[in-house]
Every structure is written in structure tokens, then in C-alpha cells.
Image (tube, helix red, strand yellow):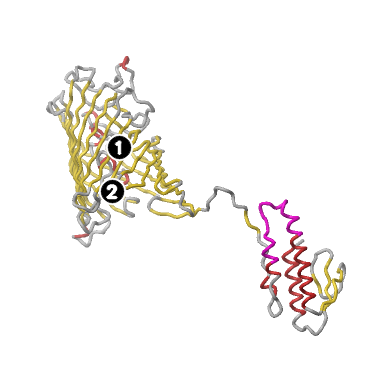
Amino acid sequence: MNINRMAIASLSMMSASWINPAFALDLYVDSNTQQIYAAPGENRVKLGSFEKKEEIDKLKATLKAEIEAELKSKQPAQADKQANPSEVITSLNTDSTNTDLTDNVATVETQPKVKKGYSPANLSYGKNGFEFRTDDDKFSLAIQNRVQARFAEPFDGDPRTLADLHKDEKSFMIRRARTKLNGHAYVPWLKYYLQYDWSQPVLRDLNLTVDKYKWAQVRVGRGKVSYNNERVTSSGSQQFVNRSIVNDVFTVDRQQGIEVKGNLFSGTWYDMTYYAGAFTGLGVGERNNDDGNMMYSGRLQWNALGGEMKFSQSDIEFHEQPALNISVAANSNRSKCTAFETDSRSCRNLTDVNAAGTARYRSPSETFEKGGAKSGQYEISQMMEEIHFKWNGFSFLHELHAKRIKDTLNNDQETKLLGGFVQAGYFPHRQIMAIPENIELAGRYAFVDMDTDRDNDKQTELSAVINYFLEGHFNKLSLQLSRLNVEDPIKLEKDNETRVWAQWDFSF
């Protein structure tokens, strides 16, 4: 039975009959369609003659009963599309003497059955990409992708030996291709973050953060150790095409463990941010530790001016007031690693030679019997100082690193390393209006001393870059020129090479 059509047709006819109540009205119902007519015809059964409103009320009561019975009979077969008979019945009770009753008949609507535990959500786009968020704000998920396309000539990496300088590996490449997922679950202060690199491939980050209190945020899982700005700042938010020659030698990179961060005395001249963590100490490539020793790391940052700045380079925010952060950090670890990089072979050895001209540090990827590093062989302690400044389109960043490596299987022989860099950038449109406002010029000097007790082993970098920001760090073009110098402590020779990088960094 088509209940909507029957109710509307019948009530429309009754409304028409009461325009002139002096005449009686004979009503007929079609036995097939159940529609109401004012004239006899085929398959039409007379309902009766009606002259008074009371008779109409009786008919409406009869129709209500029929509608309700019909709906109940359909409910078992249409459990997921139930109609609400009360809406039709309520509408039929409306006094229709002087109105068009068809306007007061509620359409019998089907309502989807609400599943327990489900919440409606909405979609938006912002700085974290496409974001899904439930209406009750219990869950959110942001999805962002990043592609970094680069041209390198004559090679891409940082040279550590004279042989590295002589490589001819001019190439185009997808240097980075990553997907990021982040958001919160159950409560807004329980956050998660995942980042996967398709170009290597490797799971770079996967962690949970309890972000309920500003003075104590706890992160558990895999991620960057909050040690120094150059490494913690995303490669997509760097001022240069890539990090300096200092990074690979002194970074503690990504680790698996727990870290606590907090901001204290916010808004005062002694505004401080601290980081403290304990980690397995083998990078992200292995699940279990190689010995009973853990990596410990700490960073103390004085937000001297302008409060705490994010780990991001270039003053694309154009700070109206100067912002200055001064930091110190320390890290200790004992393992088979002397260097780290985020890939499936995260635990690595530094490239250097001893007095005999052979490799100073054993490879952790080989077994000890085959000449590789032994579990817990290297005891490492290092520290760093950092200055970060931004104001009115100008940015400045400086880091100085010191690292000591003790070889516990070689008479506790110690090697001391030193390295650092200084870089600065500016948006010249502030001074020269003819230059587009989204162009930045920057320069950097960096050095590494692989053994402070040995001569002729320094490596230096002198770089200049021009950045064209199409959409901040989310869409930018960069062209970098670097002069790289390497010394050989065995041959007592040195050489240099010029490297060109051109890059498009694109996030969406």
C-alpha cells in the first residue's frame, strides 16, 4: 500500500468537500490502489455519504488505524528503513477545516538505524593535509604526503674521503617520498603520529604522545631524539636543500624509547623548555638492544626572547618581535654503533681511518667473527650548544658539537670529534622592493674535525642557497651551490669539489 499517496489523496478530497459544507459528499475507495474518489467507478467501493465534520473525524480515525497496521506489517521486512507512524498519525490529527490538509501531512520518512559506537565525521583540509574529525571530537586523522624531487651534480652525498670527491654520479632522483598520519584518539590530548618513507622504504616514525599538560608531555615509540635543531627539523622545513656535513657525524637520529618534554615558566624572562629521554640506542632498524645499556639524552632550552620556537628554519612567519632560543644538550650511549641513519640499516659506523690506513670503526652489520663490531663495543658521549634567532624575515642558526668515542675492545682508545656550523638567511624584499617577497637568500659554513688530536683530517662546507616559497615550506623551489673540501690524514693530501643541488619540495 502506498500510504503517502493514499493519505494525501483522501485528505485532499475531504478538504475540498468542506469548502461548501451545505452539500453531502459520497466517497469511494479503489479496492486496488486504495485511493479515495468522490465519484463511482470500476473497482471503487462506496465508503458512505458525509455531511458533518464528525463523520470526517471518524474516517480519519479509521485511516489512522489502517496506516498504523500497514506500517507494523512492513517493519520486519524493512528493519533498516523503519517508518515512524506517529508522524503521520499526528499530522492526521491536525484541524483541517480552513486549511489545505495536504500541507499538514507529514511524509513517512525512512530513518537509517544508528549503530552503537559510531559517530558522524567531517572532512577538511589544512596545514596537516586532509583531516577527518568526528563531530564529538573524540577522533581525528590527518593525512599528508610529501615528494622531494632533486637534481644533483656531480654527486648527491656528503664526501668523507678523497674518493668521494671524485665520484661522477650526476642524477635526477626522488630523494624523499613520504606519507604522514597524525591525529588524536578517544581524547584530544592522546595523540599519535606515523610517517612512512616510500623511497627507501622504511617506517620512520610511529609514536603516541600524552599531551595533556604543557609542563610534561610524554612520547612513547619511534621518533627523532630531541637533541639538536638541524636534525629534529623536518627535511621539508629546512633552510637548505639538505642538512650540513655535520649532521651524519653527530646526529643521534631516530630511536625507539620514551621521551618527556615540558615548557616551564612560560611568558617570563626565564621561560624554559626541557627534553629528557631513554632509548634502546640502536636506531630504528632493530627491535632488541645489543647489550644491557641504554641511550640517554637531554636538552635544555632557554626561550630568551619571543617564547619557544618550533623546529623550523627560515623566518617565513616574519616575526614582528625578535625570537631567541639558546640550548644545550647531551647524549650518552654504549652499543655497536658509531653513527645513525634512518633506514633498515640504521645502526652504522663512521667513515674514518686509523694510523695504519684501515677502518677505525668496525661495521655493526657484520658479525664480530668476520671483523664486525661487537655488542656494546663503543661507548659514546657527546654534547652540543645551539643558538636560534628569528626576526623580521632574518634567521640565524648555530650549532657546535663535541663527541667522544671510546673503543672498549681496543684498550679503551678514545677519539674526540668536533664539528659545527653557522647559517643565516634573509628575505631581501624587505630592503629591495623589486625582489619578490617570497624569495630567500641564505649562506652556511660548516666544518668537521674527525680527530682533534690528529692533523690533516678536516672537512668543510661553504654553501649558498636561493629559496622560492610558493606556499611556505609546503611548496618551495631551492637551488644550492656548495664548495666541499676534504683532507686525507694518511696521504696528507686535500682536494675540493663544487656540488649543485636543485630541488622541488612539495607537500599536499
* Residue hosting label 1: 225
| Residue nearest the viewer, comparing 280 with 169 | 280
Numbered disc 1: secondary structure: loop
Residue at 32% across / 22% down in the picture? 291
On the question of residue 443 being in view, the answer is no
Whether residue 366 is visible, yes or no, is yes
Q: Nearer the viewer, residue 101 or 451?
A: 101
Q: Which residue is mark 2?
A: 310
Q: Which residue does the image show at 76% across and 59% down from the upper left?
A: 70
Specify the segment rendered in magenta: 69-89
Q: Which mark is residue 443?
A: none
Work out whether residue 179 or residue 50 is closer to the camera in this orientation and state it: 50
User: Residue flagged by tag 2: what amino acid is it?
Assistant: Lys
**Crowd tier of the residue under label 2, counting other residues whose Cα lies within 10 Å: few below 14, some 14–19, many 20 or above:** few
Dividing the picture into quadrants, the one containing residue 194 is top left
Image x and y of residue 384, in percent: 20, 37
Front-most of 226 and 244?
226
Who comes first in sequence, dot 1 or dot 2? 1
449 relative position to 373: left or right:
left
Q: Is residue 86 magenta?
A: yes
The x, y position of residue 485, in whole percent, is 18, 35
- Outermost residue on the top side: it is 369
Q: Is residue 48 above or below residue 392?
A: below
The N terminus appears in which quarter of the rendering?
A: bottom right
> Does the segment drawn in magenta span residue 120?
no
Spatial separation of the CA atoms under disc 1 and disc 2: 15 Å
Dot 1: within a 10 Å radius of its alpha carbon, few (fewer than 14), some, or many (20 or more) residues?
many
Residue 469 is situated, as x and y percent measured from the top left of the image, at 30, 53
45 versus 343 height, above or below: below
Residue 108's spot in the image, x, y percent? 68, 63
Please give left or right for residue 474 compared with residue 16 in the image.
left
